[in-house]
Amino acid sequence: MKARDHSRMLAVLGEAYAAHCPGSAQLHRRAQSSLIDGGSHTLRLIRPFPPRIARAAGAWVEDVDGHRILDYWQGHYSNILGHNPPLVAAVLRTAFEQGYGLQTGFTDALQVQVAELLCERTGAERVRLTTSGSLATMYAVLLARAFTGRDRIMKIGGGWHGAQPWGLKGVDFHDENHTRFQHMDTQGLPEAIAEELLVTRFNDPQMLADHFRRYGDTIACFILEPFIGAGGFLPAEPEYLKLARELATKYGTVLIFDEVISGFRFRAGSLAPLYGVQPDLATYSKIIGGGMPVAAAGGRADIMKLAGRDGGVKFSGGTYSGHPASLLASLTMMRYLVEHEGELYPRLADLGRRTRRAVEDTFASEGLLAVCTGDGNEAVPGSSLGMVLFPYRDGTQFRSPEDTRNPKICDVVLSDKVLQLALLLEEVHVVHGMGAVSAAHTEDTIAHLSEGCRRAARRIRGLL
């Protein structure tokens, strides 16, 4: 289907938004004189300008114009308990008052405690800490290449593994010449990187088997998200992950699970055990930081030892790796999630399900076909994530980013840009149509979101 022209719609919504948020507009103009595009993370820089946030608590943020906004971005899906959870803030406040928490440059007991808990809850034999998911996935790939002596990396089309060299191919969908996810998504990298990166399709066992059959002896690692994030909030099918494990073992390939989003999102630990599949390496971040910059790569001891002083892989982690305040937040958050696992995760899954259905029902009542991904499957009992898609045809099935990001299958501009602006006018902030519910979201937030979607749908219908 031919893509719609949204230029007029975006222009009208942009004008209304500028009038609605003059303080954020003024601050954005100021920011552009010193920051590239007015900020330091492209996804946050909504056009014509992002809301500038003054404070945040629980499910809500408040911008400099005084609008109280219901937030489903939740710190890039990090805030499973909501913004600034009191239990973490209190622990950090006490530490600072007692003269501890800023950078010291030494090791301490916190690193041991965080590492022990991560190993216990993920099945890793050894872990090493760093500060971002991008770094964690980069180090995991380095370890796999060093361990196998091979160069080729295989990843999922539409999968995001951070801003690191071996993650920057096959992220964005390109429709020209049916290339789809076969493009490099950045300039500045050598052509050899593109040649080393092999892109396969999520939940496609036949393509996976074909790629291993053809390239298996040259593949250092296969890195994938067991529950894909930006590509559509879709769970891996159990037979797909089991096949990935079988083929990786057969060909001597390191299987890496990127659990930067899924780690501690579905249970107090990694998602892998729900599938009965243990990767060789895995990466974690977001939720394990408790709102602070914490990330980790972990897995088999024989691979991880290459990160040691005599191992040959420069996994140094950076100045702020193992930062005391960050690890204190991490330990506090992970312990809480472990202690409350039995009641917290079923509630989040139920809240996510009801939120997704409420969004779909609201759009349907206003004459717009919407599908909210994020549901679980026979391995994953439920999910607190969701992405709103606007397919052109009823009954469209979404199994991979080849479906969710294809503008011939669904209206991606409507989901990614139009709806975001329309909902901001209704005091709701979403990314890709929704995002993540947290423990701070409630029945009232479902009602607020539903009403926001109703009003947004009426705006959109009037501009179609």
Image (cartoon, rainbow, N blue to C red):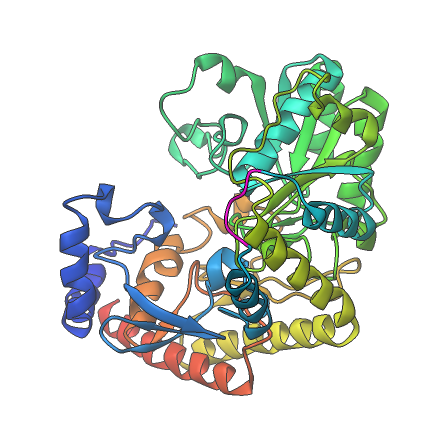
Which residue is at the front of the view, 403 or 40?
Answer: 40
Asked whether, in this view, residue 204 is left or right of residue 401, the answer is right
Q: In this view, does 113 lie above or below 392?
A: above
Asked whether, in this view, residue 299 is left or right of residue 395, the answer is right
Asked whether, in this view, residue 431 is left or right of residue 375, the answer is left
Q: Is residue 179 above or below residue 420?
A: above
Residue 164 x, y percent position in the rendering: 49, 30
Tell me the quarter of the picture where residue 335 sits.
bottom right
- Whether 198 is among the magenta residues is no
Q: In this view, does 25 lie above or below 238?
A: below
Magenta span of residues:
101-105
- Whether 103 is among the magenta residues is yes
Which residue is at the front of the view, 135 or 46?
Answer: 135
Tell me the quarter of the picture where residue 462 sits.
bottom left
Residue positioned 51% across, 65% down in the render: 97
Furthest-front residue in this view: 99
Residue positioned 19% across, 74% down in the render: 20
The C terminus: image quadrant: bottom left
- What count of labels does the image hold? 0
* Residue 200 in sight: no
Residue 153 x, y percent position in the rendering: 62, 23
* Residue 331 in sight: yes
Residue 348 x, y percent position in the rendering: 65, 73
Residue positioned 63% across, 15% down in the render: 151
Residue positioned 22% across, 63% down in the render: 9
Magenta segment main secondary structure: loop
Residue 331 x, y percent position in the rendering: 68, 57
Q: Is residue 276 above or below residue 106?
A: below
